[in-house]
Image (spheres, rainbow, N blue to C red):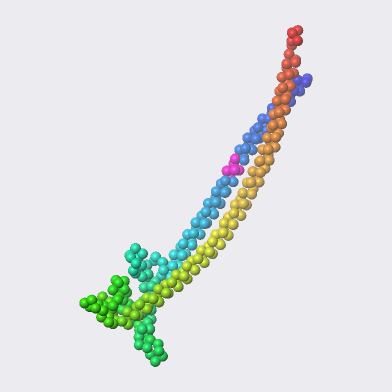
Amino acid sequence: MAFLLLVYEKMRLQRKVNKLTLRQTQLSSRKERIAKNIEKVQKMYSSKITNAEKQAQLWASQAKNSIFNSMGLGMQNQMFNPMGGYSGITSFVAGRIGQLLAGGVPVGEKGSDGKAALVKFGEGDYNKLMQEYCSGTLKEYTEDGKVVKGKYGSNGDITEQQYKAFMMSLSMAQSNQSQAQFMAQQMSSQYESNVSVWTEAYKAQLEEEQNAALLPLEAEETDIDLDMSSCETQLADARARLDSIKQACSEEIKNSAPTFGLG
């Protein structure tokens, strides 16, 4: 009777070990799937954050180009070529010189108020002066190696008044360019700063969404870890008891075996 009880307990413990082993395998498989889902969510939001940062950089560079181009300081329709030598002027300066010459430059005779009269120049005058300047010939005219007073340019057909007007306009235009550059830089820096604020806020929103998406997965992973720990403890106990029962069964079989008078 005792032996039968041992056999029954042995079978019961073996079934328990088998069930716990199966349960352990199932939990391990579930945990692996959860881990993959967590990794998938993390990769997705990591990609979104990276794309947001790259998009912000693109917006900032596009805005800067747009601002500089709108003020005549960018590459769009730019006449200045940095590889063309040390001379030359930018499109901004050239355009500003044209505006100043067309509006009038105070290089004429002084009036009763002590101010020089404004002298205006037509488009043809502007084109000629600009061509002479870019060619490097807008300077005092010489004949036989001697300077001819009051004449300028390659052919001596530019007056001193025209020369002074152009050089004054050039100086003013270059000053205006420095101011415009500062303003454009300020505007682009402000935009970049605003984009940075927006990007950080968007990244914070994405992180919040990620945490919300990970919360149920991580909670399930924690539950699985607890189940696996409990299963491992129960399995270790069941195996220890099974080994003990097996040992008892072996002893019982040994003790119940006939000795034929040899014992």
Question: Residue 126 vs residue 228: left or right?
Answer: left
Foreground pick, 29 / 121: 121
Residue 47 screen position, x and y as percent: 53, 51
Task: Give the quadrant of residue 49.
Answer: bottom right
**Rendered residue at 61%/49% (across/down):** 214
Compared to residue 45, the image places residue 85 above or below, namely below
**Rendered residue at 68%/38% (across/down):** 229
Q: Quadrant of the N terminus?
A: top right
Residue 158 screen position, x and y as percent: 28, 79
Question: Residue 245 vs residue 178: left or right?
Answer: right
Residue 79 screen position, x and y as percent: 35, 68
Asked if the magenta segment contains residue 33, the reply would be: yes
Compared to residue 144, the image places residue 223 above or below, namely above
Q: Main secondary structure of the magenta part?
A: helix
Foreground pick, 163 / 258: 163
Task: Give the quadrant of residue 130.
Answer: bottom left
Q: In the displayed orientation, state which residue is furthest to the front.
A: 146
Foreground pick, 194 / 84: 84
Foreground pick, 69 / 153: 153
Q: In the displayed orientation, state which residue is furthest to the right.
A: 1
Q: Judge whether residue 239 can be spotted in this image.
A: yes
Q: In the displayed orientation, state which residue is furthest to the top.
A: 261
| Residue segment shown in magenta | 32-37
**Rendered residue at 57%/56% (across/down):** 203
Q: Judge whether residue 12 can be spotted in this image.
A: no
